[in-house]
Every structure is written in structure tokens, then in C-alpha cells.
Image: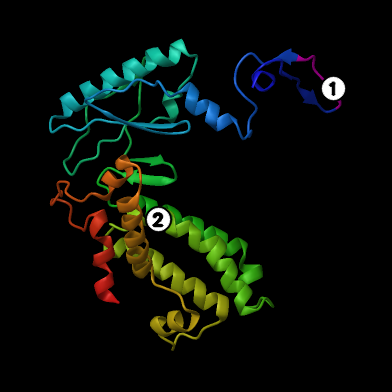
Amino acid sequence: MKSYLSERCFEVKLNNIRSDLYKIRSGVPQGSILGPVLYLIFTADIPTDNKTFIATYADDTAIMSVHENAAISSSNLQKHITEVEKWMKTWRIKANQSKSAHVTFTLRKGDCPPITLNGEQIPHSDAAKYLGMHLDRRLTWKKHIWSKRKCLGTKLREMYWLIGGKSQLNNESKMAIYKSILKPVWTYGIELWGTASNSNIEILERFQTKAIRSMFNIPKCIQNKYILQDLRLKTVKQEIAIRSLSYQLKLAKHVNTLASELSGTGSTQHTRLRRNSVPNLSLRFTKEW
């Protein structure tokens, strides 16, 4: 451990010129296996508050405040952020407020009062990206789905020479590439964004059928349901039902009580949302099979 943290040096190389060696007085080697574990230990005492909720995954941190009164919600949030600021100064951790986002998740109009970090106001935004998920203020998941749709379109164009209709690759290999590269893009977080409306989910449904038709040169006269049956592929809605059910079963059997509470059973259902909740996703689309 001592050799890992101390007596480490760095130098800068430009063309064939090297700088002198300088000691690294803090931090760990980037990309190291032990680095994330040490970071978690280093930040384990980050301040918490009983009026807010903090979620951390490595260096991605989200602080949430819930209240019917927007002013009180912002006040509680600002109080917690101020404590985090003091903690960061003590342990020499720097947060970039320009890369932070302040989002008001509500069905009402208007935003909560502004929040500051390091003396600068955190910019308001209609959505925030956290762990690869785009969270919009009304939780419609439209921004997330469109983001994935654009990413899928880009990947498909880049690989069209390999999996396109004129490719000499056999069908089994094409399907393997689709399932290993394209499909994971839109299935990531499906247990959460599966609560989106049918119109948003159909954006990905249309991409899947379009991609499959172009990959295998399938004529327009053949219906989509027969194509999916022959290729043994599930629709996006079927994937939502299957993965959501598996997700709920894992949470129910999890040894950590905090994880089992995420299943949402017994919690208050927000009926103002015009769609099903996460625990009901497995039932939502199973009826359509």
C-alpha cells in the first residue's frame, strides 16, 4: 500500500524532450484496479443530511431535496451543498460547478430558487445525465430515448459495411453483432425508462425493425411480427416486461435490505404520472404478448 501511494513521480514528454521528474503528492494512478476502492474509502465520510438524499457512484454525485414548497426544497438543498463544500475544502477535492446541473423534477411550471456551489450559481437545466441516464424534469424519458436513438443510428452507419445488406457476412454473425453491440445501447437502464409512454418506446421499436430489415434485405411485404418470430427476437415492449420482472425478483431476494426497498412495494404511488410505475412494468406489456 505504501509503495502504491508514495514515492511516485511524473514527467512530461513533448516530441523527444522530457521534463524533470516531479513527485506526485496526491492521488493514485489513473486506471488502476485499486484506485476506485481507495476513492470510495477516501470519500466515505461525505456529509449527509436528514432532509435531503445523496446518491454517489464513484465520482458521480447527486443530491436531491423533496418538498412541496420550492423555496424550502432549495433551502434544504443549499444547506447540504454548503456542508459538502466545507468537506471538499478540507480534503482538497474540487467540484466543477459549470459541469453540474440543477434540475427541478415536477409537473408544475417554473423552477426552484437557484443553488450556488463555490460561490457560483449552478445552471438550471431541463435534464441531467447521471450514470448514462438522461433524467428530464417530467421523467418522460423522451430525451434519454432520443439520445439512444441517435447513438444507435451512428453505430449502425459506422458498421453498415460489415452488417449491411451487401455484406458477405453470414446471418448468424450479423445477428451476433446486433445483439452484442447495438442491442445493449437501448437495453441499458430499460428497467427504469420502460415507464415511458408508448409513443416514446415506439421510437426504439421502429429503429429495431428498420435495422433488421436493412441488415437482411427483408422486403416490405413481410410484416414485422413474422420477422421477429423468424429471427427469435423480442420487441422492445417484451424486453421491458422480461427485464423488469427479473429486476424485481433480484431486488426482492437481495441480501441488502436497502436494495430490497427499491422494489417499490408498499410505497406511495404517484397517480399524477400518466403511466405505470416501475414495479408494474412486468405486467404492463405481458398482457400484449
- Residue of label 1: 17
Farthest-out residue, front: 255
Which element is circle 2 on?
A: helix
Q: Position of residue 34 (x, y in %)?
A: 60, 31
Residue 123 image offset from top left, x and y in percent: 35, 29
Q: Dot 2 corresponds to which residue? A: 146
Amino acid type, mark 1 = Ile
The residue depicted at 51 percent of the width and 75 percent of the height is 212
Residue 19 is inside the magenta segment: yes
| Number of other residues with Cα within 10 Å of mark 1, as a class: few under 14, some 14 to 19, many 20 or more | few
Which amino acid, mark 2?
Trp
Give the magenta range. 16-21
> Which residue occupies the foreground of this view, 234 or 259?
259
Q: Which is the main secondary structure of the residues drawn in magenta?
A: loop
Q: Quadrant of the N terminus?
A: top right
Q: Is residue 64 above or below residue 129?
A: above
Vertical arrangement, residue 13 with respect to residue 205, above or below: above
- Residue at left offset 56%, top offset 80%: 216
Task: Give x and y (percent) for residue 81.
Answer: 32, 20
Q: Which numbered tag is attached to residue 197?
A: none
The x, y position of residue 25, in whole percent, is: 64, 13
User: Which quadrant of the figure has residue 223?
Assistant: bottom left
